[in-house]
Amino acid sequence: MDNKQKFNAIFAIFAVISILVIHELWVEQQSIAPVPYSELENLLQQNKIAELTIREKFIVGELKEPENGKKTIIANRVEPELAEHLSQYKVPYTQVYESKFLATLLSWIVPALIFFGIWMLILRKFAEKQGMGGSFMNIGKSKAKVYVEQQTGVTFDDVAGVDESKAELQEIVDFLKNPDEYGKLGARMPKGVLLVGPPGTGKTLLARAVAGQAGVPFFSISGSEFVEMFVGVGAARVRDLFEQARKSAPAIIFIDELDALGRVRTAAGLGGNDEREQTLNQLLVELDGFDPSSGLVLLAATNRPEVLDPALLRAGRFDRQVLVDRPDKLGRIAILKVHMKKIRVGEDVDPGQVADLTTGFSGADLANLVNEAALLATRRQAEEVSMHDFTQAIERIIAGLEKKNRLLNPREREIVAYHEVGHALTALALPGTDPVFKISIIPRGIGSLGYTLQRPTEDRFLMTREELEHKIAVLLGGRAAEKLIFNHLSTGASDDIARATDIARNMVTRYGMDPDIGFVVYEENQPSLLGQHGYGVNGCQISDSTAQRIDASVRKIIDDTFAHTYDILEKNRDILERCAKTLLEKETLLEQELIELTSDLRR
Ligand code: ADP
Ligand code: MG
Ligand code: ZN
């Protein structure tokens, strides 16, 4: 660290000076002979002294000729009357003065030293609290919590399932390894790269991996840390971050959770955001004065790009965005493999099968899953983690922790059983729906009384109108079954209905699937990364009559689908009852059992 070096240099100069001074004193000491006063008188009488200097307490005499290598003698002064009196006895005599020097020294220096020590101690404590490693020279400079990792120890091998993002970042790795090469061709590196993606997809991990892969220091700071009480501190931190990183280029500067810092600036005077604004301004200043050819690369991450201040996203600032999305099936397999390396897995564990059951999981969810499975295996004192541990962990994560002790009353159990079987039978009866993997009436977590797990056969990016309708039908199957058997409506279906309505509304307003409404998009698409938030492409101009037609269309889709679902279940009422009874008995039904129970299903 620089300050340490400075400190060392000062210390060295001090040492040299002290040595010189001591040496000088020593040499002088060597040529001076302390003598008794009587000896001085003798020498005077013998006429051996060339010159005398009389000081307040002693007399210094220069000898005409050196004696035993000493050229100077020094003798304490003796009071004149006393000297006169004593000289007649011919004995050596001298007067001794009590030196108060040491006492004076101690009485001043010691307390000062003690205070200094205490001061240092306090400073060091303070510095440690600031996470600066305790060198007191740093204090007061800035309280920036800048984390530097000389080696992150993470490489691209540790990040799986996001190959496209990795490919985009590879270029930056190459640049950091070899800045001169890039400079020669005149290629300009992007100033800032923004990693965008849902939480837990590995953005932070990727940033560290870029540093690790390139073997450069990693300077990181989190946007949420900028939320400070005192105006100006955040700006100082930003300045410091860039300053420190510049000194150790090539390096990576990483600002995590940029959205906490770089939100759209609101009108001034609304209070409370002065600090953030100053910090953001400082960041913009640094970005503008930032020269990528210096070997610095600025990375940032956010899961909410739509709230970012447009000034941040302007060309020349964070002008490149890398999407880090949730992994698809192959990606999940790759991520699972990375994390399974850290635990002892049994031979029956197939990452492909686990990936099948974890559609929509992020990298962090999968890491958590592997850990949960390992914990479960540990709890049952197994030698290795089995597939059973994994399925259990998946259920746990999907539906919250199992609450076996929260028992439903018999009537509720019955309703839940018919409800879940309703979902399952609808799924089995309709083509192109995901197979049902498991249904259960064991209550889990909050708000979920039972559940039906479907296993998507593959990740779907494209769905037809029919498939969407079937999806809605499966969601409505629970309520349809309840209506059929008990002829009632219950609250148990509220979540299903909300999801079904969502799909139906999207069909009408976004996918243009309704003949009445036509191929017109009425819904603002997901706010685009670069777009101005709040001004949808077509979003704001819906007339009242169109809105009514949209509502009517959505309603019609739901109603028609519900009628269809009700039909299916009515046709298969005997099977519905058979399955529900078995489910009540066993509490869970797996795919195979369900297929056997429904072999005579009428479609
Ligand atoms: P984000 O910053 O996107 O919210 P993180 O990078 O903090 O997500 O991810 C949290 C953890 O999840 C990581 O430390 C890692 O263990 C795991 N993880 C997330 N994504 C991946 C991935 N693509 N490959 C391997 N592990 C991942
Ligand atoms: Mg993160
Ligand atoms: Zn349901």
Image (cartoon, rainbow, N blue to C red):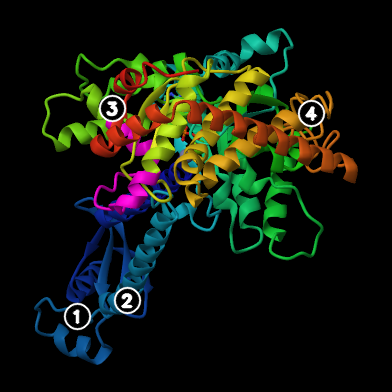
Instruction: Tell me the amino acid under the disc marked 2.
Output: Pro
Instruction: Tell me the amino acid under the disc marked 3.
Output: Phe
Instruction: Tell me the amino acid under the disc marked 1.
Output: Val
* Side (left or right) of 264 relative to 6: right
Q: Secondary structure at mark 2?
A: helix
Residues marked 1 and 3 touching at CB (< 8 Å): no
Residue at 45 percent of width and 46 percent of height: 486
Q: Give the residue pinned by disc 1.
A: 96
Q: Is residue 446 above or below residue 480?
A: below
Residues marked 3 and 2 touching at CB (< 8 Å): no
Q: Which residues are magenta?
A: 390-415
Task: Determine the CA span between mark 1 and mark 4.
Answer: 85 Å
Task: Determine the CA span between mark 1 and mark 3.
Answer: 92 Å
Residues marked 1 and 2 touching at CB (< 8 Å): no
Residues marked 4 and 3 touching at CB (< 8 Å): no
Establish whether ligand 2 lies closer than 8 Å to the Cβ of label 1: no
Residue at 19 percent of width and 68 percent of height: 35
Q: Secondary structure at mark 1?
A: loop
Q: Give the residue pinned by disc 2.
A: 111
Q: Is residue 111 magenta?
A: no
Task: Determine the CA span between mark 4 and mark 3.
Answer: 46 Å
Residue 23 placement (x, y as % from top left): 31, 50
Residue 422 in view in this figure = yes
Quadrant for residue 566, please give it: top right
Eye-nearest disc, 1 or 4: 4
Q: Earlier in the sequence, mark 1 or mark 4?
A: 1
Task: Determine the CA span between mark 4 and mark 2.
Answer: 61 Å
Establish whether ligand 1 lies closer than 8 Å to the Cβ of label 3: no
Residue at 24 percent of width and 37 percent of height: 585
